[in-house]
Amino acid sequence: MFKKWFGREPEKAPQAPQAPEIMGLRIGGAFELDSLKMRLIEPDLIIEGAATTHLIQAVGEVKLDDTTTVLRYYTDDDGFIQVLLEGGMTENHISDVKLWYFYDTQSISSKDQWDKVLSDTISQESITLEDHQFSPVWENAAQEIAAPVAMSEKTYAQDGSTSETDQFCMLYEREVKAELFEYVMFSGEEKIIDNRADRCMVKMTGFDLQPADLQIIG
């Protein structure tokens, strides 16, 4: 009755999209890595001077299919934790966790250069990075080198804004020693800004994380 007398209630402002959270990881949060483990494995890896304390500055979400999701927690140490979930969005559905660091980013200025990256650069029989040889992880049914895997990432920033990036990726690996693998990801990335394609070729290196390697501190 009172609504009829005094008019409609003012409409509430729409809430900003909420960045996904998992394992206590959240935008604006922080975590620490096991410092002893990092000291032990870093000499065998390509990364150098990795921080043990990280502040999460953005969150990425990739829907690979109806049941598989990738979450990425970007940090102030030029890297990100990647969490792979299969069959749901709870900790019980986590199948893989890796820590990635950006190695190199190259701008792509022309469509011809972009086409060459997609056809020849991302997927190769093997790659060499700093004298280490890596083999592709993803293969097709004929055991040949698979085409780059296409995905679209929605990224949540701390200010509440979001953006979309199309990515074309290939994963490579090498066995460093028993129970330690190092990975390389090649990713051709395309973002449309003001009706123009902004493209780049990104190289990342990473390694597996276990639950004991990570402590949430904020």
Image (tube, rainbow, N blue to C red):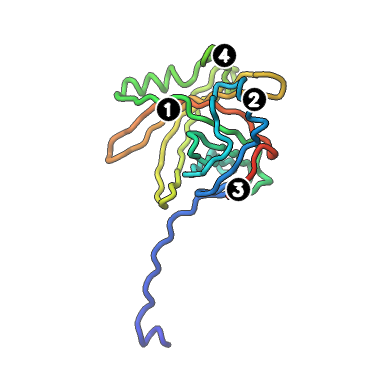
- Give yes or no for contact between labels 1 and 3 (Cβ–Cβ under 8 Å): no
Question: What separation in Å lies between label 4 and label 2 (alpha carbons)?
Answer: 18 Å
Question: What separation in Å lies between label 4 and label 3 (alpha carbons)?
Answer: 36 Å
- Give yes or no for contact between labels 1 and 4 (Cβ–Cβ under 8 Å): no
Question: What separation in Å lies between label 2 and label 1 (alpha carbons)?
Answer: 29 Å
Which residue in the protein does label 3 denote? 217
The one of 77 and 207 positioned closer to us in this rendering: 77
* Mark 1 residue crowding within 10 angstroms, few (<14) / some (14–19) / many (20+): many
Q: Which of marks 4 and 3 is in front?
A: 3
Which residue in the protein does label 4 denote? 133
The one of 18 and 168 positioned closer to us in this rendering: 18
Give the residue type that dot 1 points to: Gly
Q: Is residue 160 above or below residue 81?
A: below
Question: What separation in Å lies between label 1 and label 3 (alpha carbons)?
Answer: 33 Å
Give the residue type that dot 4 points to: Gln
Residue 78: image location, x then y, percent: 48, 34
**Which structural element holds mark 1?**
strand
Q: Nearer the viewer, mark 4 or mark 2?
A: 2
**Mark number, residue 41:** 2
Q: In this view, does 183 lie above or below 79?
A: above
Which residue in the protein does label 1 denote? 188
